[in-house]
Amino acid sequence: MPVILYLWSFNRTKSLILKNLILLLAVILCGTSCTEQKKVDENSSLFVQTDGIRFSLGGRDLYFLGTNYWYGPALALMQDTVRGIGRLRIELDFLKAHGMTNLRICAAVEGSGIIQDVPRIEPVFQSAPGVFEVRNLRGLDIVLDEMARRDMKAVLFFSNNWEWSGGFLQYLSWNKIVDDSSFVRKMDWDRLRDEVSRFYSCAPCKQQYEAQVRAIIGHTNSINGRKYSEDPTVFAWQLANEPRPMRPAAIDAYKDWISQIAAVIKSLDTNHLLTIGVEGEIGTENIDVFKTIHSDKNIDYATIHIWPRNWAWYTDLDDEEQQTKVLRMTTDYIGKHADVMKAIGKPLVLEEFGYPRDGNSFEPAATTRARDRFYDNILQYWHRSKSQKEVLAGCNFWAFGGTARPIPGQKFRKPGDDFTGDPPMEEQGLYSVFDSDTSTWKVIEKYNGIK
């Protein structure tokens, strides 16, 4: 071989070897960082994220309407398939058809039996301290799988400030902070505040709650094999339904608990958003506490609830002047919290709001003129926020009653009755929006673009 040709061939070989070495080195150096970048890209397209004061999904802004559907897992476990999973599928189809893409669901019930003079909801998950009825999570497994098929998202709350699902009172009872006799009987409001406020300083109570959180986040769906922490059907985790300090003396312990458990949850699951589940300043004693707890780096967005009847914003449902005042107070309440969250730089969701039927009737046939006006006022605010890319990003009304109907002449739910959107301690039909409430659905459709 001529010397010139040999040198050319030798140099070309060295060049190829060098290029391959550089490529190999790049792959080695990329290593974990490339894997992490791929995970970030996947999260951007599959999991809901926050982008300042807005939610995003797949790189696009996300504004949503939805409802509270806390009883979904109970339907999925019923042996009667018509009243159970058959009803569940019909109702999910109905909600999807009406643009309801976000459902707020109870992830776990603690304990069983009568509590505060009412039967709590089902199915139980933590039946005794540290004892988890994992088979009962199959109900939630089914709901999440059915929602995934319909491209819907779920907000799952881990526990409850109120007794109808066991909640904080159950932990206090297990640890003898509340005696069993008063636990079963109805407490007056002052006594209830005193007792529940002790949850935040009860170390074993908080440990048992945390164990429940870990069991749920680490659970693998028995239907589709997805680990909950890796399931994009989950929109967000929520610490509890309406967790309140209950007494000003408990505020510091309350704030500490939120910060500590939020850090734990984020260490277990980096895919999903996390929120607290509060009602706003009415539930946190003052607006400064609301601001502080939502400024925590591990809390991704804020919630508020609005309950004009429960909060005595009116005394006469039929008084036009009082109802006009309610609308003004509602707008002001949203606006006050929207200002706080805009300053913090995180989204806001109005995840509970409810209003009685005309005449305070519990009958599905009763008209809903006052309620429809109340809904219209709220959804108009949300629609304006969506149009202007503002901070109020989502609304979930309380609550969907679906195809169920209250039993005539029976105000409160009994075991075995169909679930409506009203928990057992409330009159059945009080706040439920049934599939037959045509005028209310027309208001909803007006703002979510459903024809």
Image: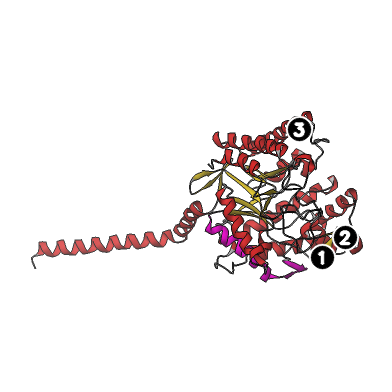
Between residue 395 and residue 252, name the one nearer to us. Answer: 395
Assess whether residue 53 is covered by the magenta stretch: no
- Image point (56%, 43%), residue name: 63
* Foreground disc of the pair 1, 2: 1
- Numbered disc 1: secondary structure: loop
- Numbered disc 2: secondary structure: helix
Structural distance between the alpha carbons of marks 1 and 2:
11 Å
* Amino acid type of the residue that numbered disc 3 sits on in the rendered structure: Gln
Between residue 163 and residue 114, name the one nearer to us. Answer: 114
Q: In the image as oriented, which residue stretches furthest toward the left?
A: 2
Question: On the image, numbered disc 1 is attached to which residue?
Answer: 113
Figure check: 243 above or below 215: above
Closer to the chain start, of discs 3 and 2, is 2
Specify start and end residues of the magenta stretch as a single range. 125-150
Mark 2 surroundings: few (<14), some (14-19) or many (≥20) residues within 10 A: many
* Foreground disc of the pair 3, 1: 3
Structural distance between the alpha carbons of marks 3 and 2:
37 Å
* Amino acid type of the residue that numbered disc 1 sits on in the rendered structure: Gly
- Numbered disc 3: secondary structure: helix
* Foreground disc of the pair 3, 2: 3
From the image, which quarter does the N terminus lie in? bottom left
Question: On the image, numbered disc 2 is attached to which residue?
Answer: 183
Mark 1 surroundings: few (<14), some (14-19) or many (≥20) residues within 10 A: few
Figure check: 24 above or below 425: below
Count of labels in the image: 3
Q: Is residue 16 visible?
A: yes
Question: On the image, numbered disc 3 is attached to which residue?
Answer: 323
